[in-house]
Image (spheres, grey):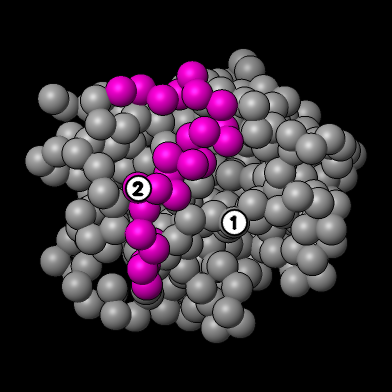
Amino acid sequence: MEFKPVFPFEPISSDVFPEGPQWIAQVKWDGVRVLTYFDGNEARLYNRKLNERTLHYPEITDIRSYCHADSVILDGEVIALGTDGKPSFYEVMRRDGLRRMEKVPQIQKTVPITYMVFDILYLNGEWVTTFPLRERQALLHKMITPNAHIQCVEDFTQPEALYNVVEAQGMEGIIMKDLSSTYVVNGKDQRWRKKKYYRDLIAGVGGVTLRNSIVNSLLLGLFDQEGRFWYIGHAGTGRLTQEDWRNLTERVKPLVTEHMPFANLPPRTADTWWLKPELTVKIVYAEWKEGHSLRQPSIQGFVDIPAEQCRLEPQEKRE
């Protein structure tokens, strides 16, 4: 049989720690959501936007090395660690954004990944999405043998205590799950909740500024419901290296346009190249200020998401 990729179950944003013995919490890993589909013959990988990633992560496609199932669909997060030992979105995007697959063996050595598996949707010819989470987890732990690249996500019974640890470590946040919850494909409801320590969003790039002929900052924007592209801030700091900036300079040249794409005028336009808003980037920021402006935006990495999906909505809907 051949699996058709599905959109995964998503948590909603919440600032409340739920109470009750049915609730567990997990670390929210700052990586790339990946579902693994194994039909008994081959394994294929797809991200949450249904873009294939099979060739990017051979550590995961070697499924018989860690999973004892005749057929299975797994849900998890691919992470890579930074120099500080914490999950780094920038590092994992060096793997996920790779376009020349012949470089995979080389980057496997420089950017090792771990697949943090937290759910199972299908097992040995049967969909298990209607099973409660506690039963799906039991099946998952029975089927998975962890190794250097594959781990099962750990549960914690005190969400607030876990959040305090995550906050102290400067990590992304936590996910809180009801152990009685079923798995809703292409669904999102309060039985899964997320509480973030820091705020982030995916934005389109509508322009760049340059210094000494090298791009040194991005002009960010989001689309409204009418399709207008609104400027929300500049970002020139973050995880990009000097080599990244040089490569970006060449990458944006085909997107240069004479027409400013924004519906509103950015405050600084000197030495700016306007771009067709096709590139998208993950941004971490300190605050969403009145007037659609980000405070202290920081670049985490470029992502493979269509720019038109970057929407100007209330922040609680975007997180």
x%, y% of residue 161? 84, 58
> Is 47 part of what is drawn in magenta?
no
Give the left or right position of residue 317, taking residue 221 as reference.
right
Identified at 74% across, 34% down, the residue is 22
* Viewer-closest of 102 and 295: 102
For the residue labelled by badge 2, is the local secondary structure a helix, a strand or a loop? helix
For label 2, the residue is 143
Q: Which residues are magenta?
A: 126-150
The vertical placement of 136 against 146, above or below, is: above
Q: Quadrant of residue 24?
A: top right
Q: How many marks?
A: 2
Amino acid under label 2?
Met
- Give percent across and percent down for residue 230: 67, 34
Compared across the picture, whether 90 is left or right of 264 comes to: left
Q: Are marks 1 and 2 in contact (CB under 8 Å)?
A: no
Q: Is residue 252 left or right of residue 262?
A: left
Q: Earlier in the sequence, mark 1 or mark 2?
A: 2
Q: Quadrant of residue 239?
A: bottom right
For this rendering, which residue is in front, 254 or 13? 13
According to the picture, the residue beneath numbered tag 1 turns out to be 154
- What SS does tag 1 mark? loop
Q: Residues within 10 Å of mark 2 (few under 14, many from 20)?
A: some
Q: Which residue is at a point 10% across and 41% down the rendered structure image?
A: 41
Furthest toward the bottom, the residue is 83
Residue type at tag 1: Glu
